[in-house]
Image (spheres, helix red, strand yellow):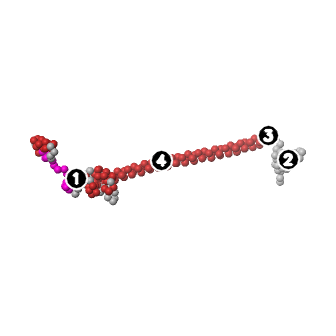
Amino acid sequence: MTAPDPKTPDGTNPAGTSSNAPAFTDQLTAQEIARLKGLLADSTAENTRLKTQVQELEGQVDAATQKALEDRAAAAEAERDRLKGEIDKRAADDQRTAQTTALTGKVRDPEAALALAERFPDLKDKDGNPSVEAIIGKYPYLAPEGTTTPTAPSGAGGTQAPATTTLDKAVESGSAADINAAFDQALKGGN
């Protein structure tokens, strides 16, 4: 069964109603509907505005989060580089210490020999470590005391230790007369 066809007494449909809808003649009801339609339109506009604002805020949060992540990544990379540099420095220090220790007792001044080997690559062996033979061969004064080398500074191939002087012998004897005589001789150019 269908609803009766609402028609005004003159036989026409009221404005804004369909032939199947009941006719609203009550003025207060029509005003309430108009007010509610206005509220619906305002709510829809407010909803759209809020959705837009939420999207903008989400975009800002995403950008801020992305920036924070980038900053953390940059900080982590800087820390990694700092630690890598520290590790490299410690490894170089450890290598230098090991090389100095290896030269101790084999040359007169291990630090000087190591410095020369670092400056002149021909003083290193195939592994990159200082070559004692090459260092002493090129710089015989670094040979340990009492070692005979074929290229002694005097050219004689003798020991590298200095000869005991007359003054040294006089001091060992403890005689004041011998010390004075040896000192006078040293001043005149003698031993």
C-alpha separation, residue under disc 2 versus residue under disc 1 = 133 Å
User: Helix or strand or loop: what does disc 4 sit on?
Assistant: helix
Range of the magenta residues? 155-170
| Distance between the alpha carbons at the discs numbered 3 and 1 | 126 Å
Give whichever of discs 4 and 1 has the lower sequence position.
4
Q: Amino acid at mark 1?
A: Pro
The residue singled out by tag 2 in the image is 13
Local packing at callout 2 (Cα closer than 10 Å; few below 14, some 14-19, many 20+) is some
**Image position of 122 (left or right of 46):** left
Q: Mark 1, residues whose alpha carbon is within 10 Å: few (<14), some, or many (≥20)? A: some
Q: Quadrant of residue 178?
A: top left
Question: Which amino acid, by three-letter code, is at mark 3?
Answer: Leu
Mark 3 lies on residue? 28
Q: Which comes sooner in the sequence, label 3 or label 4?
A: 3
Q: Tell me whether the residue at label 4 lies in contact with that at label 1, contact meaning CB atoms closer than 8 angstroms.
A: no
Q: From mark 2 to mark 3, how far is it between C-alphas?
A: 19 Å
Secondary structure under tag 1 reads loop
Q: Main secondary structure of the magenta part?
A: loop
Give the residue number, with chain letter if any, for mark 4. Answer: 75
How far apart marks 4 and 1 lie (CA) works out to 58 Å
Please state the horizontal and vertical placement of residue 55, each as a whole percent of the image: 62, 46
